[in-house]
Amino acid sequence: MSDQGMTEPSGDLCIRTLAMPADTNANGDIFGGWLLSQMDVGGGVFASKVAKSRTVTVAIEAMNFRKAVYVGDLVSVYANLVRVGRTSMTVHLEAWALRRREQQPILVTDGNFTYVSIDDNGHPQAIQRNDPPIAT
C-alpha cells in the first residue's frame, strides 16, 4: 500500500500515546520495537472487541516503517478489519504521528497483524460472528 493519498487516518482509533525519551534507540529516534509494540497493543484491543474474547497475536506481516518517530510525537494507532476466519482475523494497523507544532498527522508505520481468539485455557475458539441469519 502506497502512502500517496493517505492524508488522514482510517479505521477505529485503538490507542494514543506520547513517544518519550526512554523509548529511543542509540540514534535518539524512537525504537521501531516500541512502535511495533504500541501497534500490537492497539490491534489486540481491536481484535478482542471483534472476537468478544481474549485474543493472541500469531503473525505480523507486511510492516512498512515509512517515517521516523521522534520524542514528543503523539502516536495514534488505527485498525481496519481485513479478514475474519473461523478462529482468526487479520487486522490492518496504521500508526500516525502528530509532531509538535504540526497540524496534520503523518503515517509513520502500517502493517497486517493476525490474531486468534482463545478460550480461558488458551486454546483457539470460534469467533462469535454477528452475521444476520440466512432466510430459507
Image (cartoon, rainbow, N blue to C red):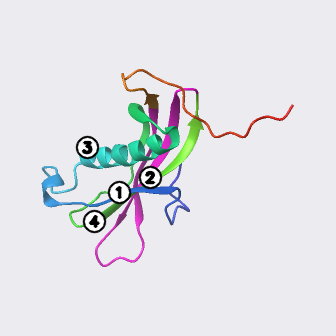
Give residue 32's position: percent from left, percent from top: 27, 47
Amino acid carrying label 4: it is Asp
Q: Which residue is mark 4?
A: 73
Tell which circle, 1 or 4, labels the residue nearer the N-terminal end: 1
Picture coordinates of residue 4, whole percent (x, y):
53, 59
Quickly name the residue at label 2. Answer: 94
Type of residue at label 2?
Glu
What is the secondary structure assignment of the residue under circle 1? loop
Of labels 1 and 3, the one closer to you: 3
Residue to which mark 1 is pinned: 67
Does label 4 or label 3 sit earlier along the sequence?
3
Which amino acid type corresponds to the residue marked 3 in the rendered image?
Gly
Which of 63/45 is in front?
45
Which sits earlier in the primary sequence, circle 1 or circle 3? 3
**How far apart are the alpha carbons under marks 3 and 2?**
15 Å
Q: Specify the principal SS of the magenta part.
A: strand
Local SS, label 3: helix
What's the magenta region? 86-115
Circles 3, 2 touching at the beta carbon (< 8 Å)? no
Q: Position of residue 109 (x, y in %)?
A: 39, 51
Q: Is residue 91 left or right of residue 29?
A: right
Mark 1 against mark 2, which lies toward the viewer? 2
**Quadrant that contains the C terminus:** top right
Q: Residue at x 41, y 45 (%)?
A: 43
Mark 4, other Cα within 10 Å: few <14 / some 14–19 / many ≥20 = some
**Residue sitting at 54 percent across and 26 percent down?**
126
Alpha-carbon distance for marks 4 and 3? Answer: 16 Å
Task: Say which amino acid is labelled 1.
Answer: Lys
